[in-house]
Image (tube, coloured by chain):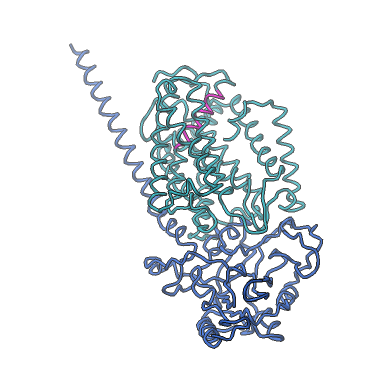
Amino acid sequence: MSKAVLFDGPGCIGCRACEDACKKKYNLPAIEITGATELPAEPTTHKGTYTQPAELSAYTWIKVRRTEIDDAKGFRTVHSLRKCMHCIHPACVAACPVGALHKDDNGATVYDDKKCIGCRYCMLACPFGVPTYEWDKPVPFIRKCIFCPDLLAEEKPPACVTACSKRTKCITIGEREAQLALGRKMIAEGKGKGEHGGDKYVDHIYGEKEVGGTNWLYLSEEPFEISGLRTFDSKILPADFQEKSWAGSWGELSQSTSEPVTVNAERAMLAVPFALPGVAIIMSGLYWVFKRKDKLIQENVDRKNQGKVTK
Amino acid sequence: MIQKKRSFPIGISILIAIALLGLWLVIRRFIYGLGAVSNLSDGRPWGFWISFDLYCGVALAAGGFTMAAAVYIFNLKKYHPVVRPAILTAFLGYTLVILALLVDIGAPWYIWHPLIYANIHSPLFEVAIAVMTYTLVLALEFSPAVFERLNWHVPLKAIRSIQIPLVVAGIAISTGHQSSLGSMLLMSPDSLHPLWYTPILPILFLISAVAVGPAVVILESTLSGKIFGHKLGQDILSGLGKALPIILGIYLLMKVADLVVRGDIGLIFSASPQNLLWWGEIIIGVILPIILLSMPKVRQSRNGVFSSALLVVVGLIFNRFNTSMLALAIRPGYAYTPSWMEVAISAGLVSWALLIIWLLYHVLPIASHENEEATV
């Protein structure tokens, strides 16, 4: 039902064809390399072409992250991708007050710029810090990978996957369950076959369970933190959250996933339709009580005065 | 509102200068983009405008619904002289919030979209609808002052007939959005520091708003009294001052109990430097005012009540900056300090508001029939 992409970390050679393909498909401009860009957000002090662009931005929606390690096992590099994870229960979708971000039938988190009011709450909510903004445009929009929805609709792979498959085939697309099975198979077959001793892959598919599960899944030979893929508190999804019909309204959450970051906010919003009328009723009741008390006191005073007058 | 910290009025010509500077910067934003007038970035999408104009602005305007509740629901007639000024302050405060949001959001021409595209799961949706609705309620609650001045008896009678439903609606709506501003931050469990992140954050936001409402009323009435020559009765100030330690006490209890229950109470000593932020907001905004206002000698003194109320306001501002900026982790590789332009735009909006208040106090019956040292 949901399309998912599996990224094979050790397979990536860092050629960045995926970045080129994405930029070409969406006509995203090149980023200045000197650091004096028009985007104040471009946090680059690097000069030289390989590290440019340094980070995701309105003009860079996928980025290969290259990390060097030098320890007992020797010098090596690790490649990973930095991009939208297309979460199953996205924080950005829950956060957007006008629903400009939503999940489509293929599991992609897509953006409707005709609804967006530019509040940037999605940027705050995303646990991966993915959505970016057009800070240099008078009519700005949120920008991020949208999983090439037009290509997915035609049963074709996204631009980055096609570009990669021409070289190393380290990213593949398929149904999420099939991709998870493939990942587990690759981990099992990679036991003991690591290039630097040990297993080829860490025994974990990143994105299987994180934040309720994502549709971009990662395999790596080194701990994921090294690639900037953070660890989350692995709280198991609370049972009541799974039962709520609205909780799965934009992506089925499987059992034993970690909590999406939206859990507490969504619970708070559930309370609103009860809290507001409740407060109104209580305040109306209190108004009546105090008015009545006033009325009784006044009647008492009137009675006393009348008594004085008739005497 | 923040201007209570400065002596008021600063000087009408200075206010006009700041207002015009702000206006010029807003025009630059619409020509060159948000990046040209701010230090906002992908690593810090919300900055000074959201922390100050939205979070502080909405909380500091809580005097409207708290005073309306005190006078019209709880029948505490003694506070009647402060209701109308409180409603005006709240109305202008909320108008400022909306104007500031028109600058901050990227597509202000779509600001009405929450009315037609509703995502009921979003706390920000609730805040948007509630702020729009409540500003209307405040305008209606304030309209009698306008109708009295214009001698429009029919509209005056009509508004007076729905006054209590308006007050009840205002309290319910305010409860909703004051707490939803806290709910918004629940979406960031990994960015907001554990000293503040808690599932009960919406409740803490509501209680602190209920506390700062009377504090702002104390400041506003004292300052406007000095400027326009009226003097508010000491018993009103003392009464408001007496309520504050009770509300703040409940707030402190809940905050500490929450930390203990979550097992994070040790962080108030170990989590550096955030623990300094925490202690700062708690000592200035909660502990000191509780101690001071528990003393009858302080409550009976105009300066004592004013200073204590000022501490509450400063502490609240500190808390809202902590939760929406200072204790919210910034993404690696990014840095943020507010640009002078962001501060100037906010200052410009506040200057416009001050100029309007000054005009309205001269033109409308806001405080004129409430001058005397009130006895009832």
Give the x, y percent position of residue B361: 58, 26
Q: For the magenta stretch, what is the residue range?
A: B211-224
Residue at position x 55%, y 58% from top?
A: A97
**Residue B234 vertical placement versus B259 (above, below):** above
* Residue A100 can be seen in this image: yes
Residue A290 falls in which quadrant of the image?
top left
**Residue A85 vertical placement versus A272 (above, below):** below
Is B66 or A192 nearer to us in this picture? A192
Please identify the residue farthest to the bottom as the structure is shown: A189
Asked whether, in this view, residue B344 is left or right of residue A251, the answer is right
Is B144 or B151 nearer to us in this picture? B144
Q: Quadrant of the N terminus of chain B?
A: top right
Chain shown cyan: that is B
Residue at position x 22%, y 18% from top?
A: A304
Residue at position x 54%, y 44% from top?
A: B320
**Residue A231 vertical placement versus A185 (above, below):** above
Give the x, y percent position of residue A65: 67, 71
Give the x, y percent position of residue B190: 52, 59
Color of chain A here? blue
Residue B76 falls in which quadrant of the image?
top left
Q: Main secondary structure of the magenta part?
A: helix
Give the x, y percent position of residue B44: 64, 54
* Residue B135 can be seen in this image: no
Asked whether, in this view, residue A85 is left or right of residue A298, the answer is right
| Residue B216 is inside the magenta segment | yes
